[in-house]
Amino acid sequence: MILSANKWQLEHSFSFFMSDTFWDDENEYAGDPFSSGKTKIKLEKLNLKVGDTFLFLYDYGDEHRFKIKVLSI
């Protein structure tokens, strides 16, 4: 939804940081649109609850940063 709202294509690497701290390697889920070995994780495995927050970083060069809040499950 963030990419679509900004009219971006999936052209850059990105990360989700579950600890609410950018560049926290231990709590990071990263993606690279150019990687053939993509790792997928199902949302239910993250045990998210309403009110939880986490961070999204898109494009490591420009560092577009977003804070995401879970509104519903």
Image (spheres, rainbow, N blue to C red):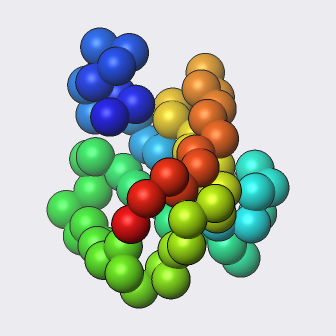
Q: Which residue is drawn at 28% across and 24% down?
A: 4
Residue 60 in the image: state x and y as whole percent.
Answer: 58, 35
Query: Which residue is the extreme one toward the top?
Result: 7
Q: Quarter-wise, where is residue 72 in the image?
A: bottom left
Residue 17 in the image: state x and y as whole percent.
Answer: 64, 59
Q: Is residue 14 left or right of residue 60?
A: left
Residue 59 in the image: state x and y as whole percent.
Answer: 51, 31
Q: In which quarter of the image is the C terminus?
A: bottom left
Residue 42 in sight: yes
- Tell me: residue 69, above or below residue 10: below
Residue 11 in sight: no
Query: Which residue is the extreme one toward the left?
Result: 36
Q: Quadrant of the N terminus?
A: top left
- Nearest the viewer among 73 and 12 is 73
Q: In this view, does 29 lie to the left or right of 72?
A: right
Q: Which residue is drawn at 51% across and 35% down?
A: 58
Q: Quarter-wise, where is residue 5 in the image?
A: top left
- Tell me: residue 35, above or below residue 73: above
Q: Residue at x 59, y 49 (%)?
A: 69
Q: Residue at x 61, y 35 (%)?
A: 66
- Nearest the viewer among 47 and 37 is 47
- Tell me: residue 1, above or below residue 26: above
- Tell me: residue 11, above or below residue 44: above
Q: Is residue 53 left or right of residue 3?
A: right
Q: How many marks?
A: 0
